[in-house]
Image (cartoon, grey):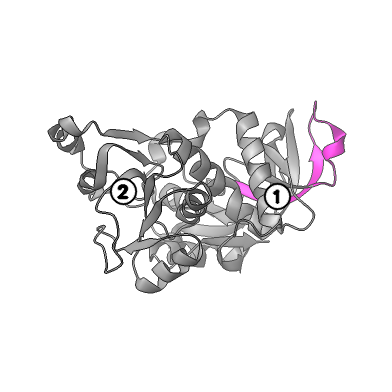
Amino acid sequence: MMAIVIKEYGGPEGLAVVDLPSPAPAPGQVLISTEAAGVGGVDTLIRSGALAAYGFTEGHVPGGEVAGIVREVGEGVDTSWLGRRVWAATGSGGYAEQAVAPVHDLVALPPDLSAVDAVTLGSAGVVAHFGLAHARFTPGETVLVRGAAGSLGIMTVQLASRGGAAAVAVTTSSPARGERLRDLGATHVLDRLGNGTADDAPSAYDVIIDVAAGEHMPAFFDRLNPNGRLVAVGAVAGQPPASFGAKLMADFQRSLSIATFSAATVPEAERRAVRAEHFEAASRAELTAVVHEVLPLDRATEAHRKMDAGEVFGRIVLTP
């Protein structure tokens, strides 16, 4: 089968198209004929070598989520999965014509939801949903989504708006992107540093969902209301300064809360239920899957170049 591997850490040119043996499903796994693979921010971090300490080595096949058809099942897996269209969390190995995934991380797809839309919504929706829950978001509160132009930020905007937020502000790199986010539920558009425009954006927020992190994260503590909560759900701009705790302690009397969130801490059954709910909502046009571009699998290098350049609004999807 055709697959994409990280031959060398660094830039997108370190990705290579190779032929690999088709994988065989182990007990508890299924083999999926890939119809679509999502390109996520974590994939670019793995490719760069930034996550090498977590066991991602050169030779790794990126791709944490796919959608396609179950072709084989491993020992102990119900054969009723055969032939079904599914979304699957692969963990890795998704940039390939075939991928294996644990059966407990499968979600059957509604008939009218495309594989491309499924991998645009699947991982991002779960992180957005449970990230807001981790922040203890309640209707009527104000929300700021920092780094809102990717699939995760876009889903957070939609879910906060659907959840009854009093305001949903976003940081983004251009007015054009801001207008697209307004169409998805944003009420106020800020620049990347959180500076407002003439639309009377709140000066502070009850909840900040931070996709970016990076050097500017501590400055956003000033954008929290007393008892405000910032939850970092990503780090596409890199790690925050090691001294950010000093800034937090300087604001001691405002009782701020800063947390990280990973969907890995959510029980599998709860993740599956939320994904199924989002897929059904998208099939009814109640949620929007924003696809930046669909590229052939062998153009993964181009996809990563666009990700690195910050050109992507929504998600790039690879199709074999």
In percent of width and height, residue 89 lies at 62, 41
- Gap between marks 1 and 2 measured at Cα: 34 Å
- Identify the residue at the far left of this view: 250
Asked if residue 135 lies in the magenta stretch, the reply is no
In percent of width and height, residue 132 lies at 45, 40
For the point 69% across and 41% down, which residue is it? 100
In percent of width and height, residue 170 lies at 37, 58
Q: Camera-side residue: 293 or 12? A: 293
Q: What SS does tag 2 mark?
A: loop
Q: Which corner quadrant of the image does residue 202 belong to?
A: bottom left
Q: Camera-side residue: 174 or 4? A: 174
Asked whether the viewer can see residue 231, the reply is yes
Question: Magenta residues?
Answer: 64-84
Q: Quadrant of the N terminus?
A: bottom right
Asked whether the viewer can see residue 89, the reply is no
- Is the residue marked by circle 2 packed among few (<14), some (14-19), or many (20+) residues within 10 Å? few
In percent of width and height, residue 119 lies at 62, 53
For the point 66% across and 51% down, which residue is it? 281
Residue type, numbered disc 1: Glu
Q: Camera-side residue: 262 or 68? A: 262
**Relative vertical location of residue 256 with respect to residue 239 in this rendering, above or below:** above
Q: Closer to the N terminus: mark 1 or mark 2?
A: 2
Q: Which corner quadrant of the image does residue 291 belong to?
A: bottom right
Q: Which residue is mark 2?
A: 238
Q: In the rendering, which numbered label is found on residue 280? A: 1
Horizontal arrangement in the rendering, residue 170 relative to residue 254 (left or right): right
Residue type, numbered disc 2: Gly
